[in-house]
Structure formats: structure tokens, C-alpha cells
Image: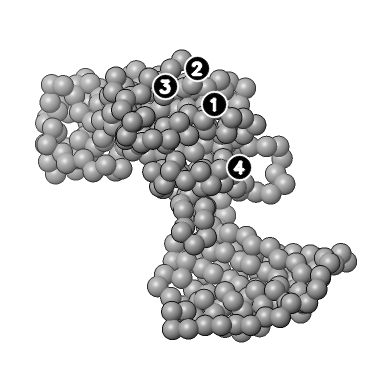
């Protein structure tokens, strides 16, 4: 059994006031043995796709504390030579931190805690990491399973030119990669986000997909950007190094023509991530969705060689829309977006008057 060097023993004092919550107390208690040196080994893992009945409590564990706060549940567990902090969220994700007298004791306890906790893989779902910046803890990544349609099942949702371009993108392999930027532009409601979900499923054997929830913060904070550039792998010790695709949605202000003046260093940092020094040695692709017309985008973003794909995802033509709907009733002469066609099919509002919510069918 390998035991990590304990180092000098340190005193541990728990201080609290009326601003602390029971969950904060569990956080502190979970680290007490690590701080003093009694447990020189520690590891934290994040969990996704938890089964609803996942106990995360092995048979040899004692439950020392439990605290429920808002949408989260904290527990402090202890066993022979180890302590664990187990946090679960209502979104069926969680985090486990184990401290232990040795790596073997700690890893074995961690394995027992998480054994059988995850839902089996569903071929109709894809795993996507969601990055956000926490003011207290820095860059955070939570992995969720989302519905990821098969590309062939949604191919008819796209106009001929966009569909052909997306066909080529779906078929990309690591050997085909030249540019590092995937740019999907077009009106709201045309299916940009749906296409990216299908792409996550199509590329899942070789590419990890992450969405950045706060791109405005990302490119304003060099430390946050550096953390994401380094990345956080879904699986440790996997076979070979995987590419990563970062999704940035609705980044109109970042990449339009006046972005350099309006956003300062943000545009420069984006370009540096795709093909500058920051991106060197990193297998990172960046996918951006925007509602802007291509002519209004900054020329540095669209220059030859930077984009792996630059696809306009527009409305279906009148003929394509009537074929999709199965009738011409309500379809305007100029065609219709995917969101408008779904509204027509549901019999809610006529095409051309559909209030498209940004992010719904992008």
C-alpha cells in the first residue's frame, strides 16, 4: 500500500459566524483531516447522469452530517481511514471529495461511493460540459446529458445549401481539420443549436463538447480563458487525446465588425484561442452561433483558413417548407423558418408572425 508523505501536523480550528450555512460547516469538516495531515491524500470527482435512486453511500460508511439547502444536499461520510463530502443537486449531478490515509484506501472508498450511481449511456443523448465562472471557486464545469438527435433524422429541417454544408461538417474527422472555427450564422429559429446538438452526437467518438454559459466573462478574464484552454477531460486515462469543441452561443457583440472597438481585448483573445499562441498544442475547436448577417461580421473572424466551416443556416424556401409541412396552408411566399413551421404544425400562429425566442431553435 502506497502512503503519501504526511508532512508536519497542522492545527485545525473551525470558525463560523451567522453568515455560514450548515453546508459551509460540512465543507470545513470534510477538509479537517486533510488540513491536519491525518489524511494526506485527497481527490474530487464530479458526477453527471446520476440515477434518481443513487445512494452514494457504501455499506461501510457512517453518515456524520446531512444538510439540505435550496436545490442541493450535502452529506459528510466517514469510513476506516477515509472521509467523504458528497454533494448532489436536483439536476441529477453531484460532486464527491474523499480524503484518506493513503491513495489506495481513498481510491477504493471513492470507487465504492460512485459504483452504479450513473445512468447507463443512452444512444439518443450526448454528454456536454457546461462551463461557468464562479466568483468564489473560479472556472467550473458541470457535465450534463442532453437529447442529441441523429443528423439523418433532422436533415430535412434545413434548406438545401445549409444541409449540404452541414453534411460535410458532420463527416469531419480529426484528419480533416484545417481551421479551428465553426461559424453558424442566420436568423433566429432556423435550427443552429439543434445542429450543434446533432454534431455533438456525430463527433462523440473523438471530440468532447463543452458549452460556455458566460462567453462575455470568458473573454474578459484571462485566467478563466486559460483554464478553459487547458480543459477538463470527461475521462482520465482514456485512449488517446480527444479534441474539444467549445460552443459559444449568441456572440453577436463579440464578432461583429465593430467588435475591436466595442469589446477591447475580447475579440483578440477569441482569435488567439483559435489559431494564436493560446491555441497552440491544444486540440480545441470553437463553434459560434450568431444571428448577424455575414457581411456585418469582423473580417478577422471570417478570413480564409480560420474557419473549419462557415455555414448560413437560413429559412426553408417555399417549396422546402411546404414539403416539410405537407401543405402550403399558411406558408408565406418567401418560405419559413423551422420555428415558424413547428408553430404552423401546432396550429398556433401563422408563419411570419411567430415570436421566435432567442435560444429556442437557434
Where residue 354 sits: x, y (%)? Answer: 15, 39
- The colour scheme applied to this rendered structure is one colour
Task: Looking at the picture, tell me which residue is in the foreground, 325 or 256.
Answer: 256
Tell me the quarter of the picture where residue 182 sits.
Answer: top left
Crowding near the residue tagged with mark 4, few <14, some 14–19, many ≥20 C-alpha atoms within 10 Å: some
Q: Which mark is residue 230?
A: 4
Q: Residue furthest top?
A: 304
Task: Looking at the picture, tell me which residue is in the foreground, 309 or 220.
Answer: 220
Distance in Å between CA atoms under marks 2 and 3: 10 Å
Q: Which residue is mark 2?
A: 305
Marked residue nearer the N-terminal end (4 or 2): 4
Marked residue nearer the N-terminal end (2 or 1): 1
Marked residue nearer the N-terminal end (1 or 4): 4
Q: Which residue is mark 1?
A: 275
Left/right of residue 345 with respect to residue 57 in the rendered view:
left
Residue at 56% from the left image edge and 43% from the top image edge? 226
Marked residue nearer the N-terminal end (4 or 3): 4
Q: Secondary structure at mark 4?
A: helix
Marked residue nearer the N-terminal end (1 or 3): 1
Q: Which residue is mark 3?
A: 300
Crowding near the residue tagged with mark 2, few <14, some 14–19, many ≥20 C-alpha atoms within 10 Å: few
Left/right of residue 218 with respect to residue 158 in the rendered view:
right
Q: Are marks 2 and 3 in contact (CB under 8 Å)?
A: no
Quadrant location, the C terminus: top left
Distance in Å between CA atoms under marks 4 and 2: 23 Å
Q: Are marks 4 and 3 in contact (CB under 8 Å)?
A: no
Can you tell which of label 2 and label 1 is closer to the viewer?
1
Amino acid at each position: 500500500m502506497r502512503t503519501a508523505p504526511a508532512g508536519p501536523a497542522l492545527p485545525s480550528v473551525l470558525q463560523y459566524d451567522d453568515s455560514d450555512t450548515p453546508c459551509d460547516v460540512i465543507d470545513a469538516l470534510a477538509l479537517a483531516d486533510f488540513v491536519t495531515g491525518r489524511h494526506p491524500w485527497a481527490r474530487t470527482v464530479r458526477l453527471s447522469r446520476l440515477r434518481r435512486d443513487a445512494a452514494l453511500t457504501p455499506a461501510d460508511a457512517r453518515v456524520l452530517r446531512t444538510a439540505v439547502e435550496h436545490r442541493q444536499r450535502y452529506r459528510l461520510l466517514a469510513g476506516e481511514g477515509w472521509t467523504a463530502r458528497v454533494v448532489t443537486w436536483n439536476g441529477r449531478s453531484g460532486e464527491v471529495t474523499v480524503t484518506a490515509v493513503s491513495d489506495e484506501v481513498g481510491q477504493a472508498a471513492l470507487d465504492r461511493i460512485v459504483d452504479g450511481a450513473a445512468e447507463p449511456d443512452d444512444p439518443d443523448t450526448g454528454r456536454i460540459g457546461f462551463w461557468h465562472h464562479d466568483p468564489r471557486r473560479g472556472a467550473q464545469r458541470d457535465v450534463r446529458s442532453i437529447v442529441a438527435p441523429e443528423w439523418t433524422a433532422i436533415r430535412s429541417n434545413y434548406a438545401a445549401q445549409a444541409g449540404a454544408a452541414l453534411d460535410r461538417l458532420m463527416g469531419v474527422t480529426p484528419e480533416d481539420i484545417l481551421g479551428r472555427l465553426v461559424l453558424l450564422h442566420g436568423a433566429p429559429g432556423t435550427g443552429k443549436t439543434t445542429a450543434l446538438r446533432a454534431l455533438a452526437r456525430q463527433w462523440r467518438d473523438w471530440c468532447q463538447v463543452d458549452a460556455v454559459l458566460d462567453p462575455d466573462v470568458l473573454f474578459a478574464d484571462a485566467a478563466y480563458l486559460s483554464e478553459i484552454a487547458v480543459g477538463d477531460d470527461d475521462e482520465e486515462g482514456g485512449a488517446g487525446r480527444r479534441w474539444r469543441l467549445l460552443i459559444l452561443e449568441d456572440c453577436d457583440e463579440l464578432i461583429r465588425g465593430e467588435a475591436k472597438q466595442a469589446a477591447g481585448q475580447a475579440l483578440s483573445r477569441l482569435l488567439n484561442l483559435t489559431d494564436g499562441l493560446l491555441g497552440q498544442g491544444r486540440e480545441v475547436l470553437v463553434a459560434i452561433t450568431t444571428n448577424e448577417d455575414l457581411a456585418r461580421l469582423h473580417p478577422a473572424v471570417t478570413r480564409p483558413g480560420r474557419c473549419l466551416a462557415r455555414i448560413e443556416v437560413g429559412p426553408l424556401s417555399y417549396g422546402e417548407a411546404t414539403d416539410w409541412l405537407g401543405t402550403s396552408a399558411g406558408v408565406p411566399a418567401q418560405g419559413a423558418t423551422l420555428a415558424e413551421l413547428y408553430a404552423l404544425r401546432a396550429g398556433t400562429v401563422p408563419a411570419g408572425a411567430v415570436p421566435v425566442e432567442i435560444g429556442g431553435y437557434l
